[in-house]
Amino acid sequence: MEIVNATGRRKSAIARVYVTEGTGKITINKKDINEYFPSAILRFVVKQPLELLDVAEKYDIKAVLCGGGFTGQSQALRLAISRALVEINAEDKKTLKTAGFLTRDSRRVERKKPGQPGARRRFQFSKR
């Protein structure tokens, strides 16, 4: 099997993934997943598509992440891994689609409006 690559995005985070056959090692920005994502919840989010298809020990994943925060990066990585798995085996698409792993979450931070402290928040109103 050759190297399969895919891209995933979430908020301002971008994940590029390169999947090869191997032993289940996940490397992110030349660091181990346990070192890059110290939180168990974020590691769980990244491994969800692999666990769903029972291929966690079958592929080595090398990822390049940039932009965003930890949560956005982990969800972008999940989308990229899901897309790569569909590219490897098209029969897995239905399973991943029903789990919601192939849908790009397009929500972004709303911009701050002029004359207000935030996007929706208003300064306190004083009648007198």
Image: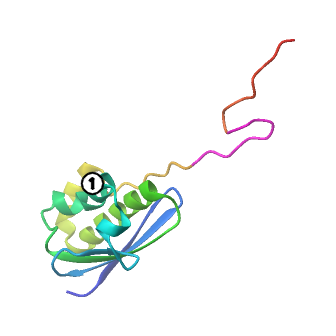
Asked which colour scheme the image uses, the reply is rainbow
Q: Position of residue 85 (x, y in %)?
A: 24, 69
Q: What secondary structure do most residues of the magenta stretch adopt?
A: loop
Residue 100 falls left or right of residue 52: right
Query: Does the magenta-highlighted stretch encompass residue 7?
Result: no
Q: Position of residue 105 (x, y in %)?
A: 44, 52
- Front-most of 26 and 85? 26
- Front-most of 38 and 125? 38
Tell me the residue at 14%/68% (across/down).
55
Q: Position of residue 12 (x, y in %)?
A: 54, 60
Residue at the top extreme of this rendering: 128
Q: Amino acid at mark 1?
A: Lys
Residue 20 falls left or right of residue 9: left
Q: Residues in magenta?
A: 109-118
Tell me the residue at 30%/60% (across/down).
46
Residue at which label 1 appears = 97
- Front-most of 126 and 77? 126
Instruction: Please say if 115 is above or below 58.
Output: above
Tell me the residue at 18%/82% (across/down).
21
Query: Does the magenta-highlighted stretch encompass residue 110?
Result: yes
Task: Indicate the quadrant containing the C terminus: top left, top right, bottom left or bottom right.
Answer: top right
Q: Position of residue 39 (x, y in %)?
A: 33, 55
